[in-house]
């Protein structure tokens, strides 16, 4: 076994990994179960192999989670090993975050040296959205790790012309597909282009290799989905958020075209009307799309999960990113599409954009340093192409898409930005010693990046004293050091040691804010559904009326309902029927392990017909139905709720509902609707009705 030497490089790498581990793991218990919809599914998956394989949301395997299996398989395995808890299901993501930091170090070091590798690792470890997602049970950072490993192999394949490494790389992307479906393919253009333009082997061989690799990619990607679709529908759960009970349709529809703003009605089956909702928040107005039907409630979108009261500002106002860093838009596609979207949209800019100028200008400096020409005949050129082609298509997508995406998807940008920034700093440092205009790139870049950070911090200037401290620290460390560096250049003072100190000081100044932003996740619970770092987490930890923390279950909000249902349960297969899988359904499954029938996350899945439901009621499989609240079925599911309301007996609220309920976060935003449609699936703010519980025992199923 090779001994690990106690070198300066290894010490620095260890410190970076320790920092990453602290940011990802420290005080992790405050996150509770994070996204309760996913947490309920993992609880169900631990209860049977059938649930495990199909990624069932409920223990009875009625409907699935609307995502592929691999990430949740890892969470379920972790829960079986360590016991089911919020900590155990978040563990795989937190580990993936730390491992990703190590992997990016290895990839960058391989081509650009240890300094670039260490800087890239440090930049990734302190990227706010990357840290926030690592502390949540969404699987995005598992995907990031998978794609980083795929890039590691394609880097070797392109340099050496090794076919087996290409196959491994594309197979790993296929594995990533089974974590987040088509999101994994965002790196495919980079992989194909890098291998195609490499010069280690002939063009003919490269094309043949890519054709064979594509077959491997498709086989691995679609293997699980095809197996599921080949199994008769009667022997498996309904595919959540699909329109025709097909994993392939889910891939193409909800997790595919809808992300591009195409075919946005696929998962909204049953909604009566598609309307645009204008939400006025103080002096600010945002426009979103909404589907509201006669069942009331929020339809479509991704409502905050769980029953714990959303901790929001007093007065019922929705927080804006400018006021509560990291706590605003849940649907990135609702922001105005433009090249400046990620810079001027609060809730996105403060999550990812801190080092973007260094990445872009550093990439240009690296091109100059490598004397970039069409011949991609060394690993440095190939890796520059790899990282840039990972970054550019994703930046364009997130800037201009009108489709469905959540700001936490921006974690996909974290790795290429970190890599190019690390490579760029080293390249610009090497150019600093040269004569001419190239030597000015580094100090100018430091000032530009510092200016951008001040611009983003200005959004939070009037709301937090911490912001003022960060702005002062940034100005002293970054701008002062950069100006002194410029003065040295003007005086032609080539003191290498002093220049190194000044550049290091400026970098410390630029890293303070993203590190503080990332560290806020240690002191306040993130939103379980929309993880993000930011100053809102600090304020929300001080008061139940601020922030967006929805990371854990309420202690009592559904306890009386749960006790009532358990006390009256006899032989029913489902303890409750309710439209949406979010909210009360997730809560009950997590707390009790009992089966709850839902129409999927959106409450619109046509998983059962009215005739089938009546037969289930007649056989004693269902007794209690909750109508109202979040979600609202359409089509056959709407018919079921209408029939249940007519045929059932209304259960007095005093029997199952707390008379004193926790304060819930309700938006008093002025809502006006128009018939015009905006972005396809942005956050929905529809009517919400109070819940009513109906008892179907003895109901006439012939009517």
Image (cartoon, helix red, strand yellow):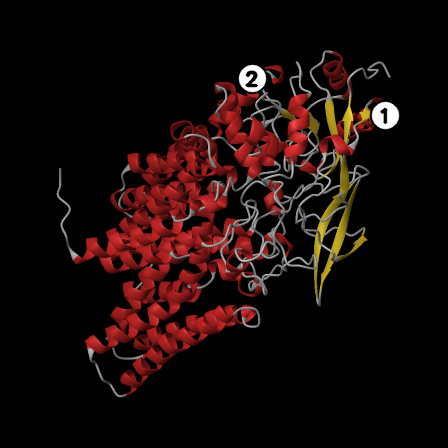
Q: What is the spatial separation of the Cα atoms under label 2 and label 1, in whole angstroms?
A: 36 Å
Q: Nearer the viewer, residue 31 or 544?
A: 544
**In the image, residue 11 above or below residue 366:** above
Tell me the number on the disc at residue 646.
1
Q: Nearer the viewer, residue 568 or 169?
A: 568
Tell me the quadrant of the picture where the N terminus can be found.
top left
Q: Residue lying furthest top in this view?
A: 619
Q: Nearer the viewer, mark 2 or mark 1?
A: 1
> Residue 590 location in percent, x, y?
55, 31
> Residue 684 location in percent, x, y?
70, 47
Judged from the image, the secondary structure of the residue bearing numbered disc 2 is loop
Q: Nearer the viewer, residue 575 or 120?
A: 575
The answer to whether residue 567 of the structure is visible from this angle is yes
Q: Residue at x 51, y 37 (%)?
A: 181
Image quadrant where residue 340 sits: bottom right
Tell me the number on the disc at residue 423.
none
Q: Which residue is mark 2?
A: 231
Asked if labels 1 and 2 touch by Cβ distance under 8 angstroms, the answer is: no
**In the image, residue 146 above or below residue 409:** above
């Amino acid at each position: 076994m090779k001994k690990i030497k106690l070198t300066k490089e290894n010490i620095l790498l260890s410190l970076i990994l320790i920092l990453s581990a602290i940011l990802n793991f420290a005080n992790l218990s405050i996150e509770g179960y994070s996204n309760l919809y996913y947490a309920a599914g993992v609880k169900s998956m631990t209860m049977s192999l059938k649930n495990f394989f199909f990624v069932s949301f409920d223990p009875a395997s009625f409907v699935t989670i609307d995502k592929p299996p691999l990430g949740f398989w890892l969470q379920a395995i972790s829960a079986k090993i360590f016991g089911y808890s919020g900590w155990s299901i978040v563990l795989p993501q937190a580990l993936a975050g730390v491992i990703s930091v190590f992997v990016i170090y290895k990839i960058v070091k391989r081509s650009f040296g240890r300094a670039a590798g260490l800087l890239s690792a440090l930049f990734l470890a302190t990227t706010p959205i990357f840290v926030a997602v690592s502390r949540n049970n969404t699987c995005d950072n598992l995907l990031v790790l998978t794609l980083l490993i795929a890039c590691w192999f394609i880097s070797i394949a392109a340099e050496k012309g090794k076919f087996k490494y290409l196959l491994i790389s594309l197979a790993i992307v296929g594995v990533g597909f089974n974590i987040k479906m088509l999101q994994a393919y965002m790196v495919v253009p980079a992989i194909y282009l890098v291998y195609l333009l490499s010069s280690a082997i002939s063009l003919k061989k490269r094309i043949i290799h890519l054709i064979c690799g594509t077959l491997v990619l498709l086989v691995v990607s679609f293997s699980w989905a095809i197996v599921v679709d080949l199994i008769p529908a009667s022997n498996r759960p309904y595919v959540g958020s699909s329109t025709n009970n097909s994993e392939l349709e889910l891939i193409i529809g909800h997790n595919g075209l809808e992300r591009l703003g195409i075919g946005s009605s696929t998962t909204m089956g049953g909604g009566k009307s598609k309307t645009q909702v204008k939400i006025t928040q103080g002096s600010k107005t945002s426009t979103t799309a909404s589907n509201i039907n006669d069942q009331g409630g929020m339809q479509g979108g991704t409502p905050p999960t769980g029953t714990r009261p959303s901790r929001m500002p007093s007065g019922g106002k929705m927080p804006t990113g400018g006021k509560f860093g990291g706590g605003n838009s849940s649907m990135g596609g609702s922001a105005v599409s433009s090249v400046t979207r990620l810079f001027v949209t609060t809730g996105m800019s403060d999550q990812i954009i801190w080092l973007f100028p260094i990445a872009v200008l550093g990439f240009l400096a690296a091109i100059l340093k490598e004397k970039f020409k069409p011949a991609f005949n060394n690993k440095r050129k190939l890796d520059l192409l790899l990282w840039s082609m990972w970054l550019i298509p994703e930046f364009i997508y997130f800037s201009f898409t009108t489709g469905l995406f959540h700001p936490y998807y921006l974690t996909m940008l974290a790795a290429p930005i970190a890599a190019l920034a690390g490579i760029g700093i080293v390249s610009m440092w090497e150019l600093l010693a040269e004569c001419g205009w190239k030597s000015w790139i580094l100090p100018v870049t430091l000032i530009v990046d510092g200016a951008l950070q001040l611009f983003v911090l200005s959004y939070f200037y009037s709301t937090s004293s911490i912001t003022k401290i960060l702005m002062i620290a940034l100005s002293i460390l970054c701008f002062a050091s950069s100006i002194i560096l410029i003065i040295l250049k003007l005086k032609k003072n080539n003191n290498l040691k002093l220049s190194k100190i000044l550049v290091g000081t400026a970098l410390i100044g630029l890293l303070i804010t993203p590190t503080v932003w990332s560290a806020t996740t240690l002191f306040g619970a993130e939103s379980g559904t929309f993880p993000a770092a930011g100053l809102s987490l600090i304020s929300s930890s001080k008061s139940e009326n601020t922030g967006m923390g929805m990371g854990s279950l309420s202690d009592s909000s559904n306890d009386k309902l749960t006790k009532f249902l358990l006390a009256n349960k006899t032989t029913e297969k489902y303890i409750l029927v309710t439209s949406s899988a979010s909210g009360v359904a997730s809560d009950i499954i997590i707390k009790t392990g009992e089966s709850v029938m839902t129409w999927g996350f959106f409450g619109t899945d046509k998983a059962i017909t009215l005739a089938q439901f009546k037969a289930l009621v007649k056989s004693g499989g269902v007794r209690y139905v909750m109508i109202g609240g979040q979600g609202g079925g359409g089509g056959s599911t709407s018919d079921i709720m209408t029939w249940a309301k007519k045929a059932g007996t209304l259960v007095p609220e005093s029997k199952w509902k707390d008379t004193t309920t926790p304060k819930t976060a309700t938006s008093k935003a002025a809502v006006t609707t128009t018939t015009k449609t905006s972005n396809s699936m942005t956050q929905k703010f529809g009517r919400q009705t109070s819940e009513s519980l109906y008892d179907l025992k003895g109901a006439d199923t012939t009517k």
